Image (spheres, helix red, strand yellow):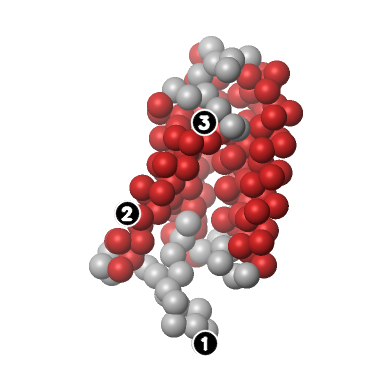
Amino acid sequence: MILADLILVVATALLFYAALTDLKSFKIRNEAIVALLALFLFHAVASGRWTHIGWNVGFALLMLAVMLVFYARNWMGGGDVKLLAVAFLWTGLACALPFALLLAVFAGMHAGAASLGWVRAPGREGDARARIAFAPSIAAALIGVFALGCLSGPQ
């Protein structure tokens, strides 16, 4: 179980990196996504959750399909879609509700901070809407799920 907890610490550090990168440059590196995917697999084995990998993959693919519609309509960036898909892979169905609730709270806080000018929210060319980095909210929500212990063992 110590190995599983260590993997969560490494994943948390990687999520912080992705969030900071997105805040600064509005980009999420593919290497971070692949590393989070690999850490998920290692964690699933180390924690005994490997028996549910099929369900987690299916759920993540379903959510990816929904998010691709948002991406096609320019409502989400590609990096956000990839990071959210990996986040849903981590949470699976068992932890999706706490993740979604935390995501709503953190995204609302981030949007509020952007409207107050506390975080950068530039508009796109020819578009009056501001855009905010979504990775910090995704990262905070997934780290929150880690902290709640939702992923701590077989479910």
The residue lying furthest to the top in this view is: 1
Residue under the point 48% across and 47% down: 138
| Distance (Cα) linking label 1 and label 3 | 39 Å
Regarding mark 2 in the picture, which secondary structure is present there?
helix
What type is the residue that disc 2 sits on?
A: Met
Q: Quadrant of residue 98?
A: top left
What residue would you read off at disc 3? 95
Regarding mark 3 in the picture, which secondary structure is present there?
loop
What type is the residue that disc 1 sits on?
A: Gly
Q: Earlier in the sequence, mark 1 or mark 3?
A: 3
Tally of numbered discs: 3
The spot of residue 32 in percent (x, y) is 60, 46
Q: Are marks 2 and 3 in contact (CB under 8 Å)?
A: no
Residue under the point 40% across and 53% down: 107
Q: Nearer the viewer, mark 1 or mark 3?
A: 3
Q: Earlier in the sequence, mark 1 or mark 2?
A: 2
In which quadrant of the rendered image does the C terminus lie? Answer: top right
What residue would you read off at disc 2? 109
Residue under the point 51% across and 49% down: 18
What residue would you read off at disc 1? 126
Residue 37 is at least partly visible in this image: no
Residue 15 is at least partly visible in this image: yes
